[in-house]
Image: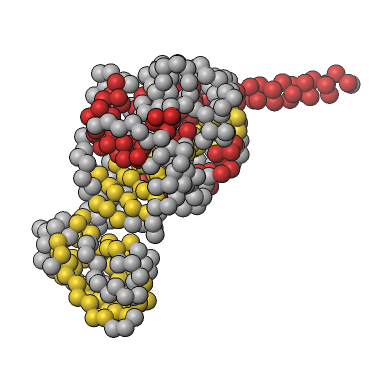
Amino acid sequence: MPTPTRRPLILIALLAALAALFVTAPASAAARPEAAEVVPTATLTEVTNFGSNPSNLQMYVYVPDTVTDHPAVLVAVHYCTGSGPAMHSGTEYASLADRYGFIVIYPSVTRASKCFDVASPQALTRGGGSDPVGIKSMVDWVTGTYDADTARIYATGISSGAMMTNVLLGVYPDVFKAGAAFAGVPFGCFATTDGSEWNSACANGTITRTPQAWGDLVRSAYPGYTGPRPRMQLWHGTEDDVLRYPNFGEEIKQWTNVLGLGQTPAATDSPQSGWTRTRYGGTGDQAPVEAIGLQGVGHNLYSYGVMGPLAIAFFGLDDDGPAPQPPAGPCKVSVTTNAWNTGLTASVTITNTGTTTVNGWKLGFTLPTGQTITNGWNATYTPASGAVTATNASYNGTLAPSASVNIGYQATHTGNSAAPGAFTLNGTACTVG
């Protein structure tokens, strides 16, 4: 009777080996359904043989238990000396994926420097044969295996990864919908022709170009492409001593030009103390270009738990959170204050001067330095200082054309009792009078 016992065991072992092969096999049409079943969820998993990979990158993928049908895909690119697993453990994108159901790809460099190639002519040309080709193959493997939504592919990265984010959006504008670059440089700024991975002139912030010239560099990566271009979110610290702060302004020039925008922000605010955020081509959370400068912050600017969610909101992946308010039409705000030694009250009147009704409103304004709201009425105020958002109460959220609503707050101050000088209603700038 030993033979009947051994045969099932051998069959089980063969099936297990075949299942393991599906994780690392190329994503052929026949293999894809099985691969989707056996790649473990809620675990960082390395995938091999994922397609063309000329620079021998490693691919790590995180698929949440909550992965949605036709999920979005986020490529999270590590910094020099880093790795895919380090990017996974050092950022919150996996936990955000658990919440929102998207898939995260973590490319990982195997060359000695652990830096991505953002300098060679091959890297800066579509299909040129370097790191971007391998990353594109990773995206193709995931979209094929999980039937992912090809209209919702995004990239983000830190330092070298931020530079690669710029490169990916330049060479594959038909693949990536948006990117978020933390402490990077413009597309093409790091270009070299001698095989070097480092460009000191760019790193030191001494390369300046016109918006048109920067935009032409991006357009030259995919000659003849006339389709839509991805949106870009940019982050940089003013005290960055690795990739100097002037690169931030050059990135803004580049991506506003690529997207056909002017250099004048549509909105400026301060989402946190020391942050200056400018938005170009729009005023909402998904403006075509968003740039956040961090006063006094160096190269290691990424802050776990703070910045990742803002990048996700910029991408539009936080779709189970509060829905963004529809843009308001023309509006007017008048404000009067009554101050005493260390306190003040402010009365604010919001008027809808447009021709359509506003259903649900958020009034944005920045308190002068030293002021802190202690209580308010007819709205909810968050946070208590800095860039504040006043959200309608349950009984006053509808503003018909020509209608007004009065709100107010009490605040402490340290000497400056002035009223805010600018207001936005659902992201649209209001006249003040």
Q: Position of residue 292 (x, y in %)?
A: 36, 48
- Quadrant containing the C terminus in the rendered view: bottom left
User: Looking at the image, is 22 positioned above or below residue 233?
Assistant: above
Residue 114 visible in the shown view: yes
What is the residue that sits farthest to the right in this orientation? 1
Quarter of the figure with the N terminus: top right
Q: Is residue 390 left or right of residue 118?
A: left
- Give 247 or 156, whichever is nearer the viewer: 247
Left or right: 200, with 254 as reference point: right
Q: Residue drawn at (47%, 33%), measured in percent from left and top?
A: 160
Looking at the image, what colour scheme do you see?
secondary structure
Choose top left, top right, bottom left or bottom right for residue 109. Answer: top right
Residue drawn at (42%, 33%) of the image: 203
Seen at 33% across and 61% down, the residue is: 387
Q: Is residue 317 visible to the viewer in this orientation of the structure?
A: no
Q: Which residue is nearer to you in this view: 216 or 176?
A: 216
Instruction: Name the residue rendered at 10%, 58% in the picture.
Output: 355
Spot occupied by residue 193 in the image (x, y as percentages of width and height): 41, 17
Q: In the displayed image of the protein, which residue is found farthest to the bottom? A: 340
Q: How many marks?
A: 0
Indicate whether 32 appears above or below 234: above
